[in-house]
């Protein structure tokens, strides 16, 4: 049952990603702007440009271009980036873990702060703590991440000088051996605690900047759904039987409330992969989101397709994971509710 | 009868502080329940029956609710007890059977999870295994043939009647002294309702629990209860033994309730009571029923006296005082 479900979802995911790749391949080529002209600059002659377009095979008909590209993809070659001059695959291997690490830290903050805070506010609706939480989460939601980024930079790096300004590691600190590409995990694995500490200090501010909006969003969603739980008879039932208040909140009210919350939470995490670019720009974080924006501005066709397909892949993957968690949490989905 | 009653509610007031003003939802309620007694509480929807049960359980406290009066349990005032001690009574000494069993059970946990939590309140089970054994025995008590299967199910996998029986077994598993039954089974079909009441009667007798049955169905009260309170707009308007009160309803509201019941003999159509339950923020002065009462007179604007009208039978109406008797009281 579960195996068949997973297989179906995986097939759907492959089709979705294929569709995404075709679309982005075409859109990148159809929108105005000549990649060769951008790459060679204003001073290039028409011959030089024509020559370059030929190297890039930009004059072939679109279906032919796509087939050529796909032939490469099957062999594990995502093409050459005009912007960096290197292989797109290598660029992604270098930049993607940086973004993944940032997204994971920010997602963790969003879950471990947003859900308890939202539960607390939903439990004590209209109390002081609820009003404070609502204000806090509203400020989080309406303030763009890069504003936080600049603000934190000013306070902790410029005034207090307790956190490093940019990058993933300080100069002179050796990067950990490449296992996952996530510095925190790799350095902990290798026992390089100096590197771990440095990487940790570097990720604090970008992690927080990237998470504040989604912490606010998660808090608000959780608050609303937990609050709705508290209006239900089953909470009154739990109280009428003297269940412990903490257990009521953390178990009997939160679990039903998580069902609608989880879906939004998953989308919030997925969006971070693309949304991280402003944060990465402010902190000079060598991540894929920043890379993605640069290659778009340079109309770096192969790199654009690579970045978009990776982001698309994580969207699909996270949605799949969320759907499975929802099915786990909600027996009515897992077992199929009989109509009554 | 000098024994201390199980529950005495004395002069209970409950006020909602609303945007529109203060709503006096309970206006000096007095209720007594003795050990093992089955008491009915009847009245229209919205007259304060359910909120009173919740107030006794200690579930009514909200920031916008004010309460005063006394709720004495074995003689001790629960208001002076503190919320933790009050919670200690719930699920152990007091329990409640809800109107809609499907809504009362949490949809995302198995019956086992929820039932174990209740059994554990009783402090009889030392381990989960023991708790499950107790739960299984309790489910057998309510005529569930496959308790293991029921325990492993989620509420949505069971029928309404089955859920109702699960709730009844939860209500009685810790052998409480007082069970509140808030219109049990009225969300289900009539057969299941009947079944529910039978089960409840038998099992509460077995454990010797007193019952406060909240109902708007008079037939149910007649069949199930020994004594009955009639409530209107947050006031007890009449009380008495079921037989006496059903034979001789005295308060005009009680009489109106009875004439609103369709008769099997078919003589005459049921009469509805004109008007509506009053707006609690602007409740009528004196007797709260007077705007709808066919016998209304100027004295009704004063607080009505609680008059003895028969053996253990009292009605809160001016008609049965010397002053009221001057004019012919056609009943």
Image (cartoon, rainbow, N blue to C red):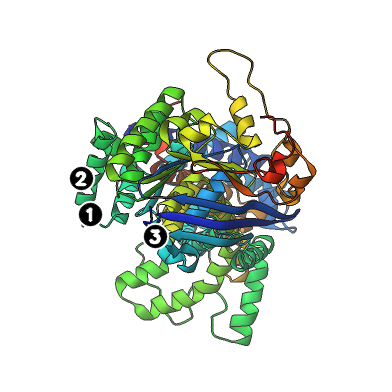
- Provide residue B122's location: percent of width, then percent of height: 29, 55
Q: How far is the residue under mark 2 from the one under mark 3?
A: 31 Å
For residue A153, say whether it is visible: yes
User: Between disc 2 and disc 1, whose residue precedes?
Assistant: 1
Which residue, given by chain and number where applicable, does mark 1 sit on? B125
Relative to A101, say whether A88 is above or below: above
User: Between disc 2 and disc 3, whose residue precedes?
Assistant: 3
**Most distant residue in the right direction:** B298
Q: Is residue B273 left or right of residue B109?
A: right
User: Between disc 1 and disc 3, whose residue precedes?
Assistant: 3
Q: Is residue A239 left or right of residue B271?
A: left
Which residue, given by chain and number where applicable, does mark 3 sit on? B74
Nearer to me, A180 or A134: A134
- Provide residue A297's location: percent of width, then percent of height: 67, 55
* Chain bearing mark 1: B
Residue under the point 75% across and 58% down: A42
């Amino acid at each position: 049952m579960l195996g068949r479900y997973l297989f179906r979802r995986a097939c759907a995911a492959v089709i979705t990603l294929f569709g995404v790749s075709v679309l982005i391949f075409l859109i990148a080529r159809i929108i105005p702007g000549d990649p060769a002209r951008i790459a060679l600059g204003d001073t290039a002659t028409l011959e030089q440009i024509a020559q370059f377009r030929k190297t890039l095979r930009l004059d072939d008909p679109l279906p032919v271009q796509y087939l050529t590209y796909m032939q490469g993809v099957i062999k594990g070659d995502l093409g050459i980036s005009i912007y960096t001059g290197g292989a797109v695959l290598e660029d992604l291997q270098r930049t993607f873990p940086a973004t993944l690490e940032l997204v994971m830290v920010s997602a963790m903050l969003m879950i471990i702060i947003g859900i308890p805070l939202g539960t607390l506010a939903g439990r004590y609706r209209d109390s002081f703590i609820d009003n404070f939480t609502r204000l806090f989460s509203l400020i989080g939601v309406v303030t763009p991440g890069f504003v936080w980024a600049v603000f934190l930079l000013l306070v902790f790096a410029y005034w207090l000088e307790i956190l490093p300004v940019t990058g993933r590691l300080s100069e002179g600190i050796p990067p950990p051996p490449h296992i996952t590409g996530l510095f925190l995990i790799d350095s902990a694995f290798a026992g390089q605690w100096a590197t771990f500490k440095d990487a940790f200090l570097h990720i604090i501010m970008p992690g927080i900047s990237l998470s504040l909006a989604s912490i606010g969003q998660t808090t608000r969603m959780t608050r609303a759904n937990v609050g709705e739980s508290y209006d239900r008879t089953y909470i009154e039932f739990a109280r009428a039987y003297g269940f412990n208040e903490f257990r009521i909140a953390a178990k009997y009210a939160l679990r039903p409330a998580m069902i609608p919350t989880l879906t939004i939470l998953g989308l919030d995490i997925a969006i971070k992969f693309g949304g991280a670019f402003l944060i990465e720009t402010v902190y000079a974080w060598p991540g894929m989101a920043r890379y993605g924006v640069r290659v778009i501005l340079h109309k770096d066709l192969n790199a654009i397709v690579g970045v978009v397909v990776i982001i698309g892949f994580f969207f699909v993957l996270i949605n799949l994971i969320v759907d499975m968690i929802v099915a786990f949490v909600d027996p009515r989905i897992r077992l199929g509710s009989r109509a009554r | 009868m000098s024994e201390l009653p199980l529950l005495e509610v004395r002069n209970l007031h409950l006020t909602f502080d609303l945007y529109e003003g203060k709503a006096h939802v309970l206006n000096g309620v007095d209720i007594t329940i003795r050990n093992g007694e089955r008491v009915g509480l009847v009245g229209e929807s919205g007259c304060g029956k359910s909120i009173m049960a919740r107030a006794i359980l200690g579930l009514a406290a909200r920031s916008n609710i004010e309460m005063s009066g006394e709720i004495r349990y074995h003689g001790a005032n629960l208001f002076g007890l503190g919320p933790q001690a009050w919670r200690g009574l719930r699920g152990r000494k007091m329990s409640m059977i809800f109107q809609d069993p499907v809504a009362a059970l949490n949809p995302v946990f198995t019956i086992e999870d929820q039932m174990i939590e209740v059994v554990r309140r009783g402090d009889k089970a030392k381990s989960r295994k023991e708790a499950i054994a107790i739960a299984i025995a309790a489910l057998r008590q309510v005529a569930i043939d496959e308790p293991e299967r029921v325990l492993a199910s989620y509420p949505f996998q069971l029928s309404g009647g089955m859920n109702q029986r699960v709730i009844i077994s939860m209500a009685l598993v810790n052998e409480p002294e007082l069970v509140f039954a808030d219109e049990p089974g009225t969300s289900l079909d009539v057969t299941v309702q009947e079944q529910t009441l039978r089960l409840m009667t038998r099992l509460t007798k077995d454990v010797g629990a007193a019952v406060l049955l909240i109902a708007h169905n008079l037939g149910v009260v007649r069949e199930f209860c020994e004594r009955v309170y009639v409530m209107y707009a947050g006031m007890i308007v009449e009380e008495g033994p079921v037989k006496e009160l059903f034979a001789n309803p005295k308060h005009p509201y009680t009489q109106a309730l009875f004439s609103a019941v369709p008769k099997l003999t078919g003589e005459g159509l049921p009469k509805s009571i004109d008007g509506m339950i009053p707006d609690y923020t602007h409740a009528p002065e004196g007797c709260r029923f007077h705007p709808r009462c066919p016998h209304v007179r100027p004295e009704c604007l004063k607080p009505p006296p609680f008059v003895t009208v028969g053996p253990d039978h009292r009605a809160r109406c001016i008609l049965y005082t010397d002053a009221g008797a001057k004019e012919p009281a056609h009943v």
